[in-house]
Amino acid sequence: MKLMPYVFPKMRRFGFSLLRHISSLPSASRTCCLHRRVFTGSYTSTITGHGFQQHRRNMSSSALRQHIQDLSGAEQRLLDKLYEGLIGGQRASLAESITLVETQHPRKKELAQVLLQRVLAYRREQESRNGGKPVAFRVGLSGPPGAGKSSFIEVVGKMLTGRGHKVSVLAVDPSSCTTGGSLMGDKTRMTELSRDMDAFIRPSPASGTLGGVTRTTNEAVVLCEGAGYDIVLVETVGVGQSEFAVADMVDMFVLLIPPAGGDELQGIKRGIIERADLVVVTKADGDLMGPARRIQAEYTSALKLLRRQSKSWNPEVVRASSHTNDGIPEVWAMLESYRDAMLASGELQGRRRAQQKVWMWSLIQDNALAHFQNHPSVRGALPQLEQRVTRGEISPGLAADLLLKAFTSSSPK
Ligand SMILES: Nc1nc2c(ncn2[C@@H]2O[C@H](COP(=O)(O)OP(=O)(O)OP(=O)(O)O)[C@@H](O)[C@H]2O)c(=O)[nH]1
Ligand SMILES: [Mg+2]
C-alpha cells in the first residue's frame, strides 16, 4: 500500500501506453465481445417503439449475431431467470445476482456485467418515469468498531419497513480484505431485521481487495435498487480506507460516534468528519447520556470549523439511542430533509454523476495496475529490481522507470 502514492502518478504515464495498445488493435478485436453483449442486453429488455428503431440503426447486425453466438443458451437462460426474478423483487434472485457480481471467475464476471447493464437500463427507465429523480436513497453509515452501527440499522430498518419501505443493508468490511475475518458482527446483531421479508441483509464478501469489495458493493447497490429496495444502507467500520470508499458511493454519509472517552475516538479521522453529512452520537441512554451530551457539544464545535460541503445542507450532530428508540425517528426525519434539500437543489443528482466517474477511475486504476503487474516483461524484471531497490543500489524512481519502460517497449505501439 505504501507504494501506491508513488505508483499512481507513474500509472498515469503508462495509462497512455495502455490506450495506445488498445487503439492499435484491429477494430474487430477492439470492440470486445462483452460490450456487444452488453448492448444487446439492454436491447432485449428496454427498447421499444422509436427507441428501438434508433438502437437498431446504431447496432450492426453482425454485433447482434455475435451476441447470440457468444452467450450459450444456458447462459442466456440463467441471465433471463436472474433478471426476471430480480426485477420481480425475488430475494433469492437478488442474492444469486450479488453472488454473480462477487465472483472471481472470468466468464461469470462477464455475465455479471451483462446482467448489470440490463438492470441499469431498467433503473434508468424507472428514473425517467420518476421525473429523472433517483428511485432509491443510498445512505452510508460508518463509525469506530462497536459504535452501535448495526443496532442503529436494526431499529431504523424496522421502523422503515413498518412504514412500507423496502430496505437493503450491505456491508463493507475492511478486515475481510486482509484476513478473511469479519470485523463487523453483521447479520448476528440484526436479528429482527434479518427475519423481515421487506429487508435484505448482505454481509461483506469474505475476501478480496478493498477495491474489489467496493466495486462489488457498488454493483450490489444497483442490483438492490433494481429489486425494488428504495432504501439502501451501507455499513462500514471506520478502519483503513473503507469509509472513504463508502462515502464515495452513497447519497448521504452518516458518521456514528459512541459516547466514549478520548482514546476510543482517536481513531476517527479528521478527513472522514469532513465527509459526514450528519453525525449521530449513539447510545444516548442511561449512564451514557452525560458523555453523549458532551461528545455532541464537542463535535458540534468541531463541525463549525470545517468547510461546508454543500450549499443546501449544513451537517449537524444529533443524539440517539437504539436501546430506548429515543431520537431515532428524529434522526431519520433529518435524513429525509437532507435528501429533499439535495434533490431540490440538484446536488444529489450531481453527486451521483461525480461518483460514477470516481468509480470508473478506481476500476481503471485496479485493472491497469493488475495489467501492469501481470505483464510478462514486468514480471521478468520485477524480482531483481525489487531486490536492488531494497538493497539501496538503485532508487525507487529509477526502478519504476525501468519497469515502465519494460512495459511500454514490449506493448504494441
Ligand atoms: N446502551 C446502549 N448500547 C448500545 C446501543 N446501541 C448499541 N449498543 C451496544 O453496543 C455494542 C455494539 O453494538 P453494534 O450495534 O454491534 O455496533 P457496531 O458499530 O455495529 O459494531 P461493529 O460492526 O462490530 O463495528 C453492543 O453491545 C450493543 O448492545 C444503544 O443505543 N445504547
Ligand atoms: Mg456492525
Image (cartoon, rainbow, N blue to C red):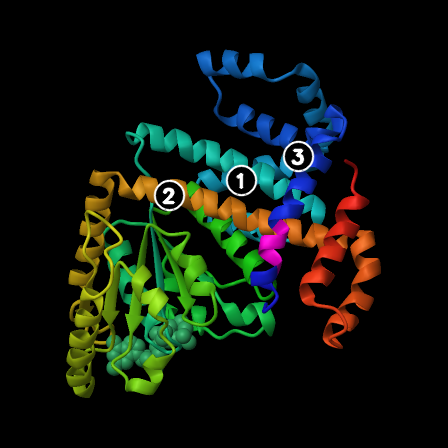
Span highlighted in magenta in the image: 7-11
| Earlier-in-chain disc, 1 versus 2 | 1
Tell me if I can see residue 273 in this picture: yes
Q: Secondary structure at mark 2?
A: helix
* 243 over 43 or under it: above or below: below
Q: Amino acid at mark 3?
A: Leu
**Residue 208 pos. (x, y %):** 61, 62
Q: Secondary structure at mark 3?
A: helix
Q: Secondary structure at mark 1?
A: helix
Magenta segment includes 9: yes
Residue 34, disc: 3
**Residue 186 pos. (x, y %):** 44, 69
Q: Are marks 3 and 1 in contact (CB under 8 Å)?
A: no
* 268 over 77 or under it: above or below: below
Foreground: disc 3 or disc 2: 2
Q: Amino acid at mark 1?
A: Leu
